[in-house]
Amino acid sequence: MRISRTYLKIFISFLLVLVVSELIIFGLLHMSWDKSPRIHHMERRLFTVKDLVEMELGDIHTSPENERRVLTPLLKTLSKSLQADIWITGPYGEIVASSTLEIPDMTEFTNGYAARSVDGIYVYKKRNNRMKSVYCVYTGKLPVGYPFTYHMYHSFPKFDEESWFIRAQIILTIIAAIFLIPVSRRVIRPLKELTTSAAKMGRGDLKQRVEIKGKDEVAELGKAFNHMAEGLEKMVKSSRELTANVSHELRSPLARMRISLEMLKERIETGNTSGCDTFINGMQAEITHMDELIGKIIEFSKLEMHESPAMTETVNLKELISDLLGQYQCVAERSNLNVHADLDEIKLSNCNRNGIGVVMDNILGNAFKYTDPQGNVEIDLSKDESGVRISVTNTHAPLPEEDLEEIFNPFHRLKGQEIPGSGLGLAATRRILRIHNGEIRAENSEAGFKIVVSIPVRNS
């Protein structure tokens, strides 16, 4: 089984946590040794010796010979049981009884720091090579007038508790290493899926998506990846469609220019220059048309590639539409159009003013351009609970049902339509309205062709 790097990082981090925790625990044990369980255990042992001695002798002091005879066997028995040297001294330091023939020299202990318990026991500690030694002293109140002082000395391996602690840490490490395998796999699996999907996307498969499970950071990463993949697929798809449509739109003027150029070249070679101005003017018109078309294509592509504009402006829709109607007044007079506008006083906040201006300019421009002579153009601006509603109706023959949706696609032109255009105006309008969370639709009505725009009102 191949060990992943993520698993190793998790495992090494866990080991570092164990090492640091072990050092902290050792430090706490070293600083608060007087509160350790072994010290408390020694205190309880010393009180046990005191209680047994007082039970044997009672409250009254007898002769030293009698006390030594009674207490020596008791202390030897307790010494074997408690694995410690025990002795008792009188008020003047004389030996009353002892479990060993030779009393240990406690000078090194008594010169050091002593911890005093609540019950009055003094505890000394000493380290020597690989051993630890604890010396406990307690002075009682009995016998009356001749109180005994109890001494207990105990040595044990220096790393007794530490060794057990280290063994526990090793066992815990082994268990953790085993249980970390499924945990790390659970974490690594979605990351591997992300890596595989990203590699496939790099090879051109933009339909790659990952399955989202849970609500953790990996799930958030998966959501971000899917969002990125969706946006990238949309961008590439739009770019491909734009390239194909641009190629189609530019092919026709280039073909006409090529024909005009061949005919112009032929006339010059034959010396017949009559009509050359017509061909030159035609090519100039085609160049102007291509330049305008490329400009509109660039503006349209910006709607796809750039981020949404700032939605922090406020626009007075009635003033905006009224200004645009003024600009198209000459067109209306030339075609003898009847224009009727029913506009409520509405201000749209939290929007992009330039974007809304482009929307209305495209819709009104198409209405005036494609209205039959002596026809009607009606504009209605109103507001309801759902938001702002704008409808523009112009006199025009009904469109086929499939064209009512197709007209919003880039470069779509109506069949048999001789009026020049790029087919990008309504496509750009829909994109801008989607940025504003708005909608646009086309429908046939009794009054003619109608465009309906709805824009929700954004709260400040």
Image (cartoon, rainbow, N blue to C red):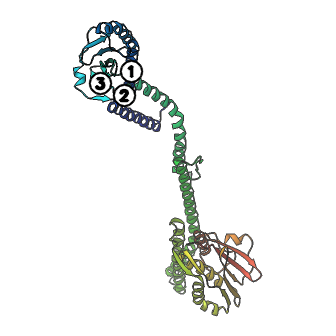
Q: CA distance from mark 3 to mark 1?
A: 18 Å
Q: Secondary structure at mark 1?
A: helix
Marks 2,1: beta carbons within 8 A: yes
| Amino acid type, residue under disc 1 in the picture | Phe
Q: Percent x, y for residue 378? A: 69, 85
Residue at the disc numbered 1: 47
Residue at the disc numbered 3: 125
Marks 3,1: beta carbons within 8 A: no
| Amino acid type, residue under disc 3 in the picture | Lys
In the image, residue 102 sits, relative to residue 216, either above or below, namely above
Residue 118 in which image quadrant: top left
Residue 415 in which image quadrant: bottom right
Q: Percent x, y for residue 240? A: 56, 61
Q: Earlier in the sequence, mark 2 or mark 3?
A: 2
Q: Percent x, y for residue 355? A: 55, 75
Q: CA distance from mark 2 to mark 1?
A: 10 Å
Q: Earlier in the sequence, mark 3 or mark 1?
A: 1
Packing grade of label 3 (10 A; few <14, some 14-19, many >=20) is many
**Which residue is depicted at the point 54% across and 34% down?**
182
Marks 2,3: beta carbons within 8 A: no
**Left/right of residue 141 with respect to residue 249 in the rendered view:** left
Q: In front here: 25 or 294?
A: 25
Q: Secondary structure at mark 2?
A: loop
**Which residue is depicted at the point 70% across and 88% down?**
376
Which callout, 2 or 3, points to the residue nearer the camera?
2
Packing grade of label 2 (10 A; few <14, some 14-19, many >=20) is few
Which callout, 3 or 1, points to the residue nearer the camera?
1
Q: In front here: 77 or 405?
A: 77
Packing grade of label 1 (10 A; few <14, some 14-19, many >=20) is some
Q: CA distance from mark 2 to mark 3?
A: 18 Å
